[in-house]
Image (cartoon, rainbow, N blue to C red):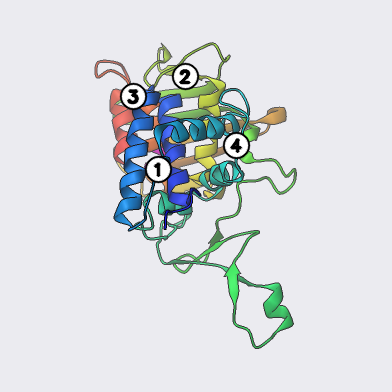
Amino acid sequence: MVRKNLWDRHEQAVLLVALQEVLYNNCDREKMIVDISRQLRQRAIANGDKIDDKFRNETGIRLQMLSLEHIFTNGKSGINKPNKWNSEIIHIYRDDWPYFQYVLHDGTTPLVEPCPRCGGTHTAPIHQETKEQGKNKKSSVSMPALQGPRYHCYDCHYDFGSAPVDPATGKAYADMVTEMTYTIETNDEDTSQTYTFRKAPAHIATQPGTTLAEANATTIPLTPAQWQTLTHTLYSKVRLHEWNQTTLGSPGQNDVTWALKIMQNKGKYVVYRGTNAFPSLWKDLMQVLMPWMRMKKDEPGEKLVAEGERK
C-alpha cells in the first residue's frame, strides 16, 4: 500500500531547518529542495513504505517550503497556502526546543531538558491529572503539563520549562525585546568589549561578521527577520527568561566579568551578570551570538570573544 502523503513531525522539522538555511545563510533554495526530496524519499523507503513518483517530489517540496515560509515570516514572503502543521512546527521550534531537536533527529536524541538554573540533567517532565482521570479515580493516565513549568530538576529542585511569555501582559518575551547589549571584560589587561544588537530597517542586509566597530564598542544591526530569529532563539533554546540574574564564582587574579542587558518596551530592562562563573546554558548563548560577534584576529577584543566562547 502506497504511503499517504501526510507530513510527519520529522519531515516538518527538516523542512523548517532547510527554510532557515535558505533565508539566513544564503543556501541555494533549489539545491536544498533537491537534497530534501532525496533525503525524505530515501527515509520512507528505508522505513519500508511504498511510495510513488509524487511522494516528496521536488515540486511538492518547493510548494511546502513556500507555504511554511509565509507563516514563518509573518506573510512577508512565501505563498499564502498554509497547512495546519505549518503553524504547529513553528510553535514547537520556538517554544519547545528539546522536542524540536527530538523530532528533527527522528527520535534518536534523548528527550532530556537540562535545568537552565544549575545545568543538571536529573530532570523529568511534570505531569498533571487529565479530566478523564479526575472523573475516574481508578485511572492512572496522566499527561505532560500544558501550562506553567513542564519540567522538574531534582538537583536544585527548580521547576522550569514555562512558555517564554510574560504572565503580566501575555506577550512573548522575544517580542518585547528592543535592544540587547553584551559586555565582557577582564582585569588582567584591563580590557573590555561591548556588543549591541539592534533591529535595523529591512533593506539593510546584514551577514554574520558584518559589524560597525568603534573603539571597544560594536553595534550589530540585524534585519527584522534576523532579529526575530535571534530573539526567539534566546527564549526558546537558551531559556533566557529562566536564568538567574546573577552568577558569581570564586575571585581570582584574572577575573572575567560579563553582563547581558535586555532592553524592553517602555524603557524596561533586565540585566544578567556574572563574575568568574557562567550560567549552565552559556554555551547555547554563545552559539547564538558568536556568528555575529566573530571578529578578525587582529581586531581589539578578539581575546575576550574567545574567552567567552571557551566557557
- Residue 30 lies, in percent from the top left, at 38, 25
State yes or no: discs 4 and 2 in contact (Cβ < 8 Å): no
- How many marks do you count on the picture? 4
Q: Quadrant of the C terminus?
A: top left
What residue does disc 1 label? Answer: 284
**In the image, residue 93 lies in the stretch drawn in magenta:** no
Direction bottom: furthest residue = 138
Earlier sequence position, callout 1 versus callout 3: 1
Mark 2 element type: strand
| Relative vertical location of residue 129 with respect to residue 298 in this rendering, above or below | below
Mark with earlier residue (4, 2): 4
Whole-number angstrom distance, CA of label 3 to CA of label 2: 11 Å
Q: Position of residue 102 (x, y in %)?
A: 41, 54
- The reply, left or right, for residue 20 in relation to residue 44 is right
Of pointers 3 and 2, the one earlier in the residue sequence: 2
Q: Earlier in the sequence, mark 2 or mark 1?
A: 2
- Return the residue at label 2: 220
Residue under label 3:
294
Compute the Cα span from label 4 to label 1: 16 Å
Q: Main secondary structure of the magenta part?
A: helix
Q: Amino acid at mark 3?
A: Arg
